[in-house]
Image: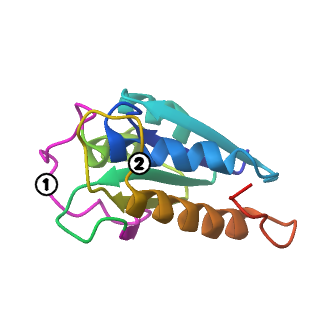
């Protein structure tokens, strides 16, 4: 597998499920040499997903006071994620800490792209807010186009 896409989140905390929703939507595409992984809660399992791939794309919800539905993109290939390693995380350990551990262990892929989808609500609930749902759809189209050799990307709406 050349590329792994990892969706991180919690299906029971509204917009925190954005990464999982994106991973599930990407599963509908034929993407050669691409593995898709859902991590629901235990972010330390990301270390296993990073092994044996050239490129990793990680999608997660973020809360940074930006406009809900905003997409934050960061190339973590050469530099650590910005911000504190002690940032509040709904996953128990921060994504930044896991990525740095992967670097130290020598399992860090050649390229690691992080997409953060700005959430509006992290309260109990199983649905994404409209802004985040729209952002997920747009990001999925973008990623599928980047990873696909098959031409135009099909519509995400039935």
How dense is the environment of label 2, judged by Cα within 10 Å: few (below 14), some, or many (20 and up)?
many
* Viewer-closest of 16 and 156: 156
* Viewer-closest of 86 and 157: 157
Residue 156 located left or right of residue 132: right
Residue 106 has which mark? Answer: none
What is the x, y in percent for residue 102? 40, 41
- Name the residue beneath numbered marker 2: 128
- Name the residue beneath numbered marker 1: 84
Q: Is residue 51 visible?
A: no
Residue 26 located left or right of residue 86: right
What is the x, y in percent for residue 62? 29, 55
How many numbered circles does the render carry?
A: 2
Cβ–Cβ below 8 Å for labels 2 and 1? no
Q: Quadrant of residue 115?
A: bottom left
Quarter of the image with the N terminus in it? top right
What is the x, y in percent for residue 88? 14, 44
Provide the residue span drawn in magenta: 70-93
Relative height, residue 103 to residue 133 (above, below): above
Chain-order first, disc 2 or disc 1 = 1
Circle 1 SS class: loop
Residue in the image at 75% along x and 47% along y? 28
Q: Is residue 82 visible?
A: yes
């Amino acid at each position: 597998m050349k590329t792994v896409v990892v969706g991180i989140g919690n299906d029971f905390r509204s917009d925190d499920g954005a990464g999982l929703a994106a991973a599930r939507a990407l599963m509908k595409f034929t993407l050669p040499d691409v593995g898709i992984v859902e991590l629901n809660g235990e972010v330390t399992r990301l270390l296993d997903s990073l092994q044996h791939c050239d490129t990793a794309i990680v999608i997660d919800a973020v809360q940074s006071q930006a406009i809900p539905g905003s997409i934050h993109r960061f190339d973590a290939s050469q530099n650590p994620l910005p911000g504190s390693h002690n940032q509040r995380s709904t996953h128990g350990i921060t994504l930044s800490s896991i990525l740095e551990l992967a670097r130290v262990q020598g399992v860090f892929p050649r390229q690691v792209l992080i997409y953060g989808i700005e959430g509006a609500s992290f309260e109990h609930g199983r649905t994404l807010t409209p802004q985040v749902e729209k952002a997920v759809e747009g990001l999925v189209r973008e990623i599928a186009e980047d990873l696909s050799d098959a031409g135009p990307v099909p519509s995400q709406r039935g």
